[in-house]
Image: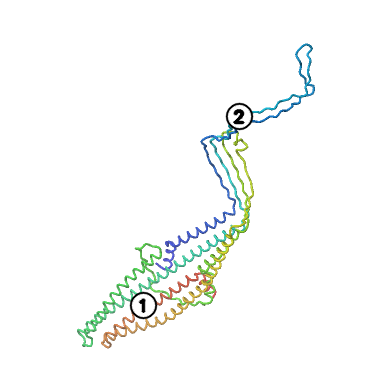
């Protein structure tokens, strides 16, 4: 697989990306929860209730005193007398003596035991002193932080895949160097054996034995290099999100070398616009400032509109469940005014402000830290570029030296030890050069991780 194929597969298979995306979704859901406070809150309730007995109201027995009084009669009212002549006696009023009226005990039923009730309640917060805005700023800051965390995850995946990909290329190159060196050492061993047995006697058996020790030692090292190559391929597969028994072979046979020519000051100053760590801290400051706004709202009153609709179904039509009482609505306006809470609000605001100041100080530390990290990687890239040419020249010279010593040894012009040393030196210089190439690529990948690929594209687009 090519590097681009490995990166595409890692973006699809890595379990770190879904985890970071879920974190963003959680933060966005919390932000929408904060926005829900701006809307009216409407709830509906439906219930059934059965009472063991019908509720009633009992009026106790009582006595009502009625004082003596005179009841006036209409004008011309008279009472006829019995007897001859039919005489009538005119009356103007009738006197009623004082008396006491007895009222017996009364048991009044209020409602039926079975009732169905439906209601709808509304609450709309009109003014809260900035509380909802503070919660909104906090949740939006959290969303921005999680997005930067997801972006950092992607950058880390790219960095890991790139380093493991070229690490696998390096492991294969080192294995190839070891195998080639072992093959040449075995050929030299056979030549040494022939020369000490059939030659002029300049090459002795001790030379053969020394060569034999080096060959077997190198054989063990090649076995370790083969194991390293296999594990590097497995590690690359694991970084891509594949199973433990998978192995990825890089299609590149050699590591590319691209000189890195960027301005350190411009790189550091522009990195603050793209570094996910820097953006995450800025989002954290905005969230902390929202917390201050939320706590400050504790000083202000809160104003809300309330309303209710209700409907009651009960078979009784008197008492407390007349047709007028079975349904209705209410509308109201409420205000809550804080008076004294033991300085709780004041100390909450102090805590939130201290958190903002703490985050700002951490931002200053991060600013210096990012600059120092970029400078360290930048100097490492410069050193790697200088080492690249030096190790390349050393590898070329070591290869030429090994070839000359090998041909001279066939004519018995040099000692066996010098031939062995030339072959080992060639292997060492090749390994050092390949390691330098890998370090250069790894440092470039680390730079992309520190500042983000966007800043590198911007700097290259505007040299």
Quadrant of the image containing the C terminus: bottom right
Helix, strand or loop status at disc 2: loop
257 relative to 132, above or below: below
On the rendered image, what quadrant is the N terminus found in?
Answer: bottom left
Point 34% across, 68% down: residue = 231
123 or 386: which is nearer to us?
123
Mark nearer the viewer, 1 or 2: 2
Tell me, for residue 131, which label it has, or none: none
Q: CA distance from mark 1 to mark 2?
A: 116 Å
Q: Residue at x 48, y 66 (%)?
A: 152
Pick the residue in front: 54 or 378: 54
Above or below — where is 185 with respect to 134? Answer: below
In the picture as drawn, the residue positioned furthest to the left comes out as 197
Image vertical order of residue 105 relative to residue 147, above or below: above
Quadrant of the image occupied by residue 412: bottom left
Q: How far across and how far down the image is residue 177, in percent?
A: 33, 76
Chain-order first, disc 1 or disc 2: 2
Number of numbered discs visible in the structure rendering: 2
Q: Is residue 390 left or right of residue 424?
A: right
Vertical comparison of 91 with 427: above or below: above
Label 1 Cα crowd, 10 Å radius (few <14 / some 14-19 / many 20+): many
The residue identified by callout 1 is 431
- For the residue pair 19 and 178, the one nearer the viewer reads as 19
Label for residue 104? 2
- Tell me residue 390's x, y (percent): 41, 82
- Residue 7 appears in the rendering: yes
Q: Secondary structure at mark 1?
A: helix
């Amino acid at each position: 697989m090519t590097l681009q194929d490995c990166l595409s597969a890692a973006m699809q298979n890595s379990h770190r990306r879904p985890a970071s995306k879920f974190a963003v979704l959680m933060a966005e859901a919390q932000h929408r929860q904060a926005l829900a406070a701006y809307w009216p809150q409407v709830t509906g309730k439906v219930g059934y209730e059965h009472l063991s007995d019908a509720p009633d109201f009992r009026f106790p027995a009582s006595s009502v005193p009625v004082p003596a009084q005179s009841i006036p009669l209409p004008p011309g009212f008279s009472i006829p007398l019995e007897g001859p002549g039919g005489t009538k006696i005119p009356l103007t009023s009738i006197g009623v003596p004082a008396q006491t009226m007895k009222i017996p005990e009364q048991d009044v039923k209020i409602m039926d035991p079975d009732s169905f009730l439906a209601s709808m309640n509304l609450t709309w917060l009109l003014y809260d002193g900035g509380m909802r805005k503070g919660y909104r700023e906090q949740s939006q800051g959290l969303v921005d932080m999680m997005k930067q965390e997801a972006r950092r995850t992607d950058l880390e995946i790219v960095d890991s895949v790139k380093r493991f990909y070229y690490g696998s290329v390096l492991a294969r190159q080192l294995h190839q160097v070891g195998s080639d060196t072992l093959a040449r050492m075995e050929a030299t061993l056979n030549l040494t054996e022939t020369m000490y047995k059939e030659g002029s006697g300049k090459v002795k058996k001790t030379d053969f034995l020394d060569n034999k020790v080096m060959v077997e030692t190198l054989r063990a090292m090649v076995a370790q290099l083969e194991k390293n190559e296999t594990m590097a391929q497995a590690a690359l597969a694991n970084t891509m999100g594949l199973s433990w028994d998978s192995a990825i072979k890089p299609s590149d046979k050699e590591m590319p070398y691209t000189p890195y020519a960027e301005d350190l000051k411009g790189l550091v100053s522009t990195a603050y616009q793209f570094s996910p760590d820097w953006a995450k801290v800025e989002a954290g400051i905005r969230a902390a400032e929202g917390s201050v706004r939320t706590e400050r709202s504790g000083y202000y009153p809160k104003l809300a509109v309330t309303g209710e609709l209700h409907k009651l179904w009960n078979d009784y039509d008197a008492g407390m469940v007349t047709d007028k009482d079975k349904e209705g609505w209410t509308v109201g306006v409420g205000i809550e005014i804080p008076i004294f809470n033991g300085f709780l609000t004041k100390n909450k605001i102090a805590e939130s402000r201290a958190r903002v100041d703490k985050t700002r100080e951490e931002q200053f530390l991060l600013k210096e830290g990012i600059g120092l990290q970029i400078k360290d990687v930048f100097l490492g890239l410069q050193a790697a570029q200088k080492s690249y040419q030096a190790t390349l020249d050393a590898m070329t010279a070591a290869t030429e030296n090994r070839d000359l010593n090998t041909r001279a040894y066939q004519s018995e012009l040099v000692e066996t030890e010098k031939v062995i040393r030339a072959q080992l030196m060639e292997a060492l210089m090749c390994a050092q050069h390949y390691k330098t190439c890998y370090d250069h690529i790894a440092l470039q990948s680390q730079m992309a991780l520190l500042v983000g690929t966007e800043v590198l594209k911007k700097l290259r687009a505007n040299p």
